[in-house]
Image (tube, grey):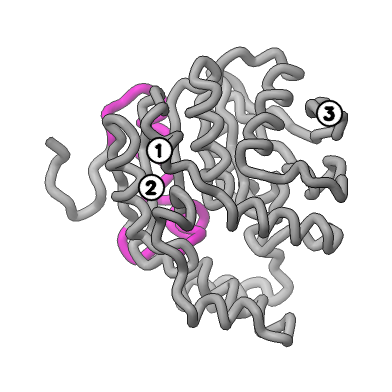
C-alpha cells in the first residue's frame, strides 16, 4: 500500500493500476479513491491510472490543521507523482477534483499532459453557484433526507430507482467517505467553497476538455462555458440529461470520448451538437 509524504509530513495514500501513459483521476469533495471504482477499469485498460485519497479521506492522514485548499491539494498530487516516479501525467478531475486539477495544471504545467475538467467550476467569485433550493436540501437536519437529496443531485430518478431495485443496500461511492472525521469534512467544504482559480485559468497550457452534464444542479452546467472561455483553446463536451455523477451513470456516453481525447484525439463533439469549428 504506497504512501507519499506531503510537504507538511502528511501521509497520502495512492494506488496504481493498468498500463500505458499515466493518468491521475481526482475525486470530489469529501470522497476517497473509490469515487472512480465504477469506471476505473475502463481507463486502466489504456492508461496507468493513479487514484489517491485526498488528505482527510480514506487511508491518508487527516490532520486538523489549516492545510486544506485546492492549491494545497494540487501540491499533494505533486508529492504523490514524485513518490510514484511519474514526471508527467494526464489529469482527469471531477467536481472538487476538477477544482484541484485547475491549480495542478496552472501551477505545475510541466507535470500535466492533457487535462479533463468534469462537473466543476472556476469558483464562487466568477462561477455559477448552486441554487438556494439545493443548499436548503443539503442542510436539512435529517441525515437520511440529506442523503436522499444528494443521491437525486447525482443521478437521474429512473437510473437511481433501477439500481436501488437491483440492490437495495447498494453503496454509492459519490456520497462522501463515511469514515471521515467531522473536522476533515468541514475543512474539505471550506476548501471547495473558497476555490477561486479565475486568475490562474489563463495560465493552463495543457490541451483541455471541459465535460458537464446538462442537468447538473449540484454544480450548474453554466460553469462549463465559463471554464472553456477562460482556458486557452479549451473545448466543452456536454452530456445531455446527465446530473452531477455523469461519469458513472452516463459512462457509455462520456468515457470513450474522454479516453479518445486523452489518447491525443481531437476534442469530441457533444451528442446532438454540430461539429466543433
Q: Dot 3: what SS?
A: strand
| Sequence-earlier tag: 3 or 1 | 3
Residue placed under numbered mark 2 in the picture: 211
The x and y percentages for residue 31 are 69, 53
51 on left or right of 229: right
Residue 112: within the magenta? no
Which residue corresponds to the image point at 57% horizontal and 82% vertical from the top-left?
Answer: 136
Task: Say whether marks 1 and 2 touch (CB < 8 Å).
Answer: yes
92 on left or right of 241: right
The quadrant of the rendering that contains the N terminus is top right
Question: Mark 3 packing: few (<14 Cα in 10 Å), some, or many (20+)?
Answer: many
Q: Nearer the viewer, residue 150 or 226?
A: 226
Residue placed under numbered mark 1 in the picture: 258
Residue 24 quadrant? top right
Q: CA distance from mark 3 to mark 1?
A: 28 Å
Q: CA distance from mark 2 to mark 3?
A: 30 Å
| Sequence-earlier tag: 2 or 3 | 3
Residue 265: within the magenta? yes
Q: Nearer the viewer, residue 158 or 5?
A: 5
Count of marks overlaid on the render: 3
Which residue corresponds to the image point at 37% horizontal and 51% vertical from the top-left?
Answer: 253
Residue 30 quadrant? bottom right
Q: Which residues are magenta?
A: 240-267
Residue placed under numbered mark 3 in the picture: 3
**Which mark is in front, 3 or 1?**
3
Amino acid at each position: 500500500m504506497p504512501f507519499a509524504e506531503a510537504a507538511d509530513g502528511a501521509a497520502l495514500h495512492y494506488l496504481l493500476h493498468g498500463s500505458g501513459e499515466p493518468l491521475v483521476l481526482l475525486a470530489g469533495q469529501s470522497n476517497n479513491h473509490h469515487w472512480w471504482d465504477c469506471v476505473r477499469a475502463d481507463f486502466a485498460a489504456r492508461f496507468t491510472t493513479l487514484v489517491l485519497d485526498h488528505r482527510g479521506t480514506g487511508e491518508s492522514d487527516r490532520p486538523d490543521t489549516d492545510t486544506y485548499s485546492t492549491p494545497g491539494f494540487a501540491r499533494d498530487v505533486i508529492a504523490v507523482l514524485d513518490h510514484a516516479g511519474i514526471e508527467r501525467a494526464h489529469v482527469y478531475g471531477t467536481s472538487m477534483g476538477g477544482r484541484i486539477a485547475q491549480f495542478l495544471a496552472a501551477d505545475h504545467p510541466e507535470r500535466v499532459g492533457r487535462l479533463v475538467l468534469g462537473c466543476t467550476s472556476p469558483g464562487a467569485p466568477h462561477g455559477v453557484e448552486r441554487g438556494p433550493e439545493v443548499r436548503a436540501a443539503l442542510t436539512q437536519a435529517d441525515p437520511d433526507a440529506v442523503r436522499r437529496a444528494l443521491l437525486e443531485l447525482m443521478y437521474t430518478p429512473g437510473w437511481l430507482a433501477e439500481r436501488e431495485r437491483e440492490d437495495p443496500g447498494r453503496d454509492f461511492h459519490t456520497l462522501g467517505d463515511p469514515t471521515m472525521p467531522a473536522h476533515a469534512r468541514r475543512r474539505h467544504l471550506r476548501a471547495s467553497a473558497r476555490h477561486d482559480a479565475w486568475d490562474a485559468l489563463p495560465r493552463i497550457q495543457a490541451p483541455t476538455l471541459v465535460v458537464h452534464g446538462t442537468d447538473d444542479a449540484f454544480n450548474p452546467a453554466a460553469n462549463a462555458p465559463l471554464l472553456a472561455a477562460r482556458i486557452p483553446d479549451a473545448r466543452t463536451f456536454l452530456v445531455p440529461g446527465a446530473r452531477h455523477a455523469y461519469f458513472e451513470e452516463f459512462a457509455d456516453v462520456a468515457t470513450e470520448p474522454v479516453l479518445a481525447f486523452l489518447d491525443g484525439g481531437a476534442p469530441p463533439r457533444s451528442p446532438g451538437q454540430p461539429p466543433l469549428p
